[in-house]
Image (cartoon, rainbow, N blue to C red):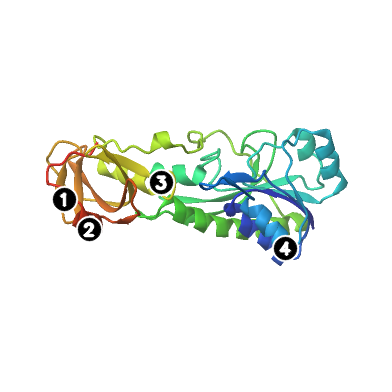
Amino acid sequence: MKVVFMGTPDFAVPCLERLLTEGHEVSLVVTRADQPKGRGHKMTPPPVKECALSRGLPVLQPATLKDDAVFEQLKAEEADVFVVVAYGRLLPQRVLDLPRYGCINIHASLLPKYRGAAPIQWAVLNGENESGVTAMQMDAGLDTGDMLLSARVPITEDMTGGELHDALSTLGADVLAETLTALEAGTLKPQKQGETTTAYAAMLDKSLCPLDFTKPATALHNQVRGLNPWPSASCRCEGKLLKIHKSAVGGAANAPCGTVVKLDPLTVSCGDNTSLILLEIQAEGSKRMAAADFLRGHALPLGTILE
């Protein structure tokens, strides 16, 4: 099939690569603009652009898809299908109507759950025990189109948002390949989503980072997992920021919330008489390390209050 691919982050790269492996003709790759990164604010291309250029594919980085010139360029491709994976922009209706088979989106949740920008992380934050990928026939709404195919993965109790991201990225390529094969064969059976959706999976920001130790340990453990690798759960220890990268649910604890009740392993009391074990942390101006290594260089008395 002749495909226009739209995607931006590393999550979308396996899908682009699978299209090429499966023998599809990717005539154009559409992605977001290069962004300044790092301390030097060097302009850096998105991962999809890097992949496309390495494969000799033409790349388009429009500021908007509403522009008439951009529309005409997409129309001129005469593509069979547009494949959209974490592109980051809504497609206008006239763009959705261009391809012969419409626009297929690979979304990182089991729709209709977790429509929105950060479905992977919110599945972990909310303590879900499974997630997956859904191939969807796009319409003008936000992740509201008919479902085509899906696949599931379990979320284990210690799986992080980053680990789930990687698993779903690979799974997404499998679902895409299966969807396009069925699309050509005419065997897809679209299903309406209905409205039994969870809360919108909003984009993550640093306001989600602070740990509230009055909450039960399970909720805090989910927070640590869901915000790993970014933007990272955090607290304050003796007035200084402490990022928490890895944790575990501990045993019962009868102490004011936020109290360090044990040093081996580093354990903090939480709501409902529960406790959270801090396994991997990062102090201000320091690197990420095991909590045991941190304690060897930082005297932290029992009874210290983490805020």
Query: Label 2's element?
Result: helix
Q: Which mark is residue 55?
A: 4
Can see residue 150?
Answer: no
In the displayed structure image, the side of residue 11 where residue 33 appears, left or right: right
Amino acid type, mark 3: Gly
Q: Earlier in the sequence, mark 1 or mark 3?
A: 3
Measured as percent of width and height from the top left, residue 36 is found at: 59, 44
Measured as percent of width and height from the top left, residue 127 is found at: 38, 45
Q: Residue pushed farthest front?
A: 40
In this orientation, which residue lies closer to the viewer: 287 or 88? 287
Amino acid type, mark 1: Ala
Q: CA distance from mark 2 to mark 4?
A: 45 Å
**Circle nearer the viewer, 4 or 1:** 1
Q: Provide the residue designation for mark 2.
A: 292
Q: Which mark is residue 226?
A: 3
Above or below, 92 relative to 285? above
Query: Label 3's element?
Result: helix
Q: CA distance from mark 3 to mark 2?
A: 23 Å
Classify the position of the C terminus by image quarter: top left
* CB under 8 Å between discs 2 and 4: no
